[in-house]
Amino acid sequence: MMRETAVRPGRNKNTKAEGPKIIIGSVDFIMLFVVILLVIIGTIMIFSASYYSAGDSAAFNHDIYYFLKRHLMYLVIGLFLLIILSIYNYRNLRNLAIIGYVASIVFLVLVLFVGTEINGAKRWLWFFQPSEVAKLGLILYLAAYIDMNKGILSDRKGFFKCVGIIAIPTGLIAIENMSTAIVIAAIGMGMLFVATPNIKLFYPLIPIGGLVVILGIIKAKFRLGRILAWIDPFAYAEGKGYQAVQSFYAIASGGFWGLGLGHSRQKLGYIPEAHNDIIFSIICEELGFFGAAIIVILFMMLIWRVIRCAMSADSEFGTLVASGIIIMIAVQVIINIAVVTNTIPNTGIPLPFISYGGTSLIIMLMSMGIVLNISKFRKG
């Protein structure tokens, strides 16, 4: 049952209307249904992609359910937080956003000094990834800052203040993880694009961004190697092109209908950590083009529902938060699938709701809880 409440301004003798009204109803159940479907598919595929490597390794006590059990633990935490945030009035997050942003910056600094090094990079702080927390921290604070400083994006000075808010976490993350830095920069700049009335303010950033990318490639020689492997992966099949080649084999062998759930051959030691960022190739192999298309359609449905939510949100803060969250999801989906199909150079970005990864899953579910709450408050 929907009910209508007026928000501002009050009616007086000289006015005929109260101003915009807000329709307060239930959450977007279509959006919630799509998220649940993606989570279920992700859980099934994580077990299918990981049971062989987990059972074959003494490091995991030869327990074929090792990754599944850990994933379910993260999933329960994430769903609990989704429920809480879908009930908690999202407007209250505006005043808490600065705390989340500052905390994420502190975590990003700490990880550089006391973080756990995995595969040659420090990305873990104790039991979580600060870069994932920083994504949501940036979204909430940037949205709150713009909303509380009306008109700040109308001139160059205010615009570059907001760019500075984006640049701090982006720069800290880029030290160890360029791919995630690109994602968080895309989130922030996408939000500015939604909120900025003057598109010309973006023009000076184009050459600056291009220069930063070129310097990043030159400074880190391994990135140049990734580009060469991307151009001709089979020429580097024993090195940096290995994962791309194995992904090709998985996708090709899946055909239209796939080999069947659990029947992937590439996960049998050919694709390392197949349950992580590269899991979409296992989906293509086991479920075929049909299964992969279903997942892409589900993501398209989710993106469309969140766009609708952002367009009808009852406040600028709600619009910007929903916009930032959908940019975060969309960018990661595009990059992940593009990497698996070798459309872009290899980089490590998880597939939302589907790839194994505790911090990523929890943050994604928390984000969707916030969007579900925003979806209850719509402009009349």
Image: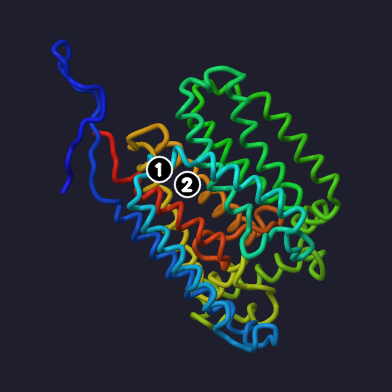
Of labels 2 and 1, earlier in sequence is 1
Amino acid identity at mark 2 = Ile
| Residue shown at 57% from the left, 68% from the top | 356
The total number of labels drawn is 2
Name the side, left or right, on which 90 lies relative to 334.
left
Q: Quarter of the image containing the C terminus?
A: top left
| Residue shown at 35% from the left, 54% from the top | 31
The disc placed on residue 307 is: 1
Amino acid identity at mark 1 = Ile
Name the side, left or right, on which 67 lies relative to 321.
right
SS at badge 1: helix
Name the side, left or right, on which 173 lies relative to 369.
right
Q: Can residue 294 be seen in this view?
A: no
Q: Can residue 303 be seen in this view?
A: yes
Closest to the observer, 158 or 331 = 158
| Residue 262 rendering spot, x and y as whole percentages | 52, 82
Name the side, left or right, on which 229 lies relative to 205.
right
Q: Using a 10 Å C-alpha cutoff, classify the residue at mark 2 as few (fewer than 14 neighbours), some (14 to 19) or many (20 or more).
A: many
Closest to the observer, 352 or 136 = 136
| Residue 344 rendering spot, x and y as whole percentages | 67, 52
Closest to the observer, 324 or 253 = 324
Asked whether disc 2 touches disc 1, contact meaning CB atoms under 8 Å apart, the reply is yes
SS at badge 2: helix
Q: Name the residue under label 2.
A: 326
| Residue 225 rendering spot, x and y as whole percentages | 82, 56
| Residue 374 rendering spot, x and y as whole percentages | 35, 44
